[in-house]
Amino acid sequence: MSRIVLGVGGGVAAYKSALLLRAFTEAGHDVRVVPTASALRFVGAATFEALSGNPVSTEVWDDVPAVAHVRIGQTADLVVVCPATADLLARAAAGRADDLLTATLLTAHCPVVFVPAMHTEMWLHPATQDNVVTLRRRGAVVLPPAVGRLTGPDSGPGRLPEPVDVAALAAVVLSDGAAALAPDLTGRRIVISAGGTREPLDPVRYLGNRSSGRQGWALARVAVARGAEVVLVGANVEDPAPFGARVVRVGTAEELRVAVHAETVGAGGRAADVVVMAAAVADFRPASVAGTKLKKGSAAEPSAVALVRNPDVLAELVTARPAGQLVVGFAAETGDAEGDVLTHARAKLARKRVDLLVVNDVSAGQVFGTDDNEVTVLAADGSVTPVRAGRKDAVAAGVWDVVVPRLAALD
Ligand code: CTP
């Protein structure tokens, strides 16, 4: 259990902070909500008090003997300001202490995450952008806002990311610190495939696999948080698009192949800086697909399913790779009589000629459909980087930590 301070700014997106609060308490954290006075014009103190089980105050004059304006910040493990309005970013950047939340920001030793939400003009204004630069320079995480529908009929950058995404990203900072969401992928175009392809046998049946797509979704969410422009090619993943990523939904290996190639080349001809093949792509598909349902006892009842090889998308990407592009493969391996997981993975890295191979030990089948993962990243230069076991978002941050310096070396 950690102590989280949830600062709430006075914007209409404040209503979503109640859902974020709920996500934090359900994860077992002790949450102290510190709204600004204007936040309470959008959501009542009773909502925050009932959901957090803690008292709510906005001013330093409440509960003076407890010296709350100092103690709340000092004892926090994480401060999340959601939504962070233009005014709140400005006051935080200026180091003001004119209410309990800004005083708390000045006394907090722990990581601080700002989740901006405001109208597009306010976000893009140089004053706000300068404040963001200042706060990031001081070590705070300032998430890029989502692009989408704003309060009125208009849309653009400035929308609050969904609470589920904020909760997942806050958990990364809680476990790995603010550096795990440093904006070090800013300006990068990244294509990620995720999920598992399904190869149809007839109109209702398919050959599939157990990939949930969650690790790819986490890679996308964390890359966006670190500043990248992300396209996620998702094979049979029902989950909503993760924060900030554009999702292209596909079914079969062939559809995935077409989408990955198109997105990697880029519509405007700007090739992706990184391609990550996290999808479990079927190596084989049925040689023929029945146009009607295969029925028991019918003349068409199959006694065996003939399979043909699917193209290896990763191999095609490696062959077509433009200079400066980093290609990352995934390998789900089990140890066997011929060698352990790393031995198989090293052989695959060499065979596939990828820059990096993210290796999953699936011997016990524990990875599929869960929120946790543990991987080792092998590089073509021979380096082996174990990524600390944890939530898939934290593992994603560990993978990007390996990618970032290699990307810089290619510039
Ligand atoms: N992959 C791909 N196209 C395929 C199969 C796999 O692009 N038709 C990619 C996966 O997305 C993953 C990597 O290749 O990044 C490793 O997949 P894997 O199935 O482990 O590789 P294989 O060469 O099929 O190895 P194995 O012989 O162990 O099946």
Image (spheres, rainbow, N blue to C red):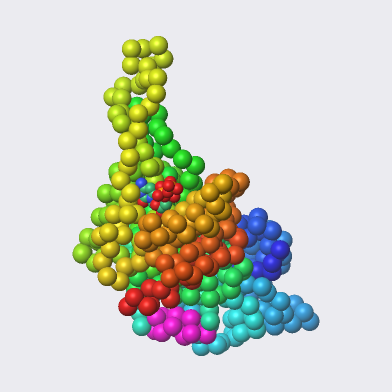
Image quadrant in which you'd find residue 71 = bottom right
Tell me what residue is drawn at x 27 percent, y 70 percent. Answer: 323
Of 319 and 54, the residue lying toward us = 319
Residue 148, magenta (yes or no): no
Tell me what residue is drawn at x 38 percent, y 42 percent. Answer: 283
The spot of residue 257 in percent (x, y) is 30, 49
The spot of residue 314 in percent (x, y) is 34, 54
Q: Residue furthest right?
A: 65
Image quadrant in which you'd find residue 76 = bottom right
Instruction: Decide: is 43 above or below 74.
Output: above
Instruction: Decide: is 98 above or below 366.
Output: below
Tell me what residue is drawn at x 48 percent, y 85 percent. Answer: 137
Tell me what residue is drawn at x 33 percent, y 12 percent. Answer: 299
The reply, left or right, for residue 31 in relation to residue 274 is right
The reply, left or right, for residue 111 in relation to residue 330 is right
The reply, left or right, for residue 24 in relation to residue 317 is right
Of 195 and 154, the residue lying toward us = 195
Find the magenta span and give its range: 127-138
Q: Chief secondary structure of the magenta span?
A: helix
Residue 228 seen in render: yes
The spot of residue 151 in percent (x, y) is 40, 62
The spot of residue 193 in percent (x, y) is 38, 53
Number of labels in the image equals 0
Image quadrant in which you'd find residue 190 = bottom left
Of 114 and 174, the residue lying toward us = 174
Residue 264 seen in render: no
- The quarter of the image holding the N terminus is bottom right
- The quarter of the image holding the C terminus is bottom left
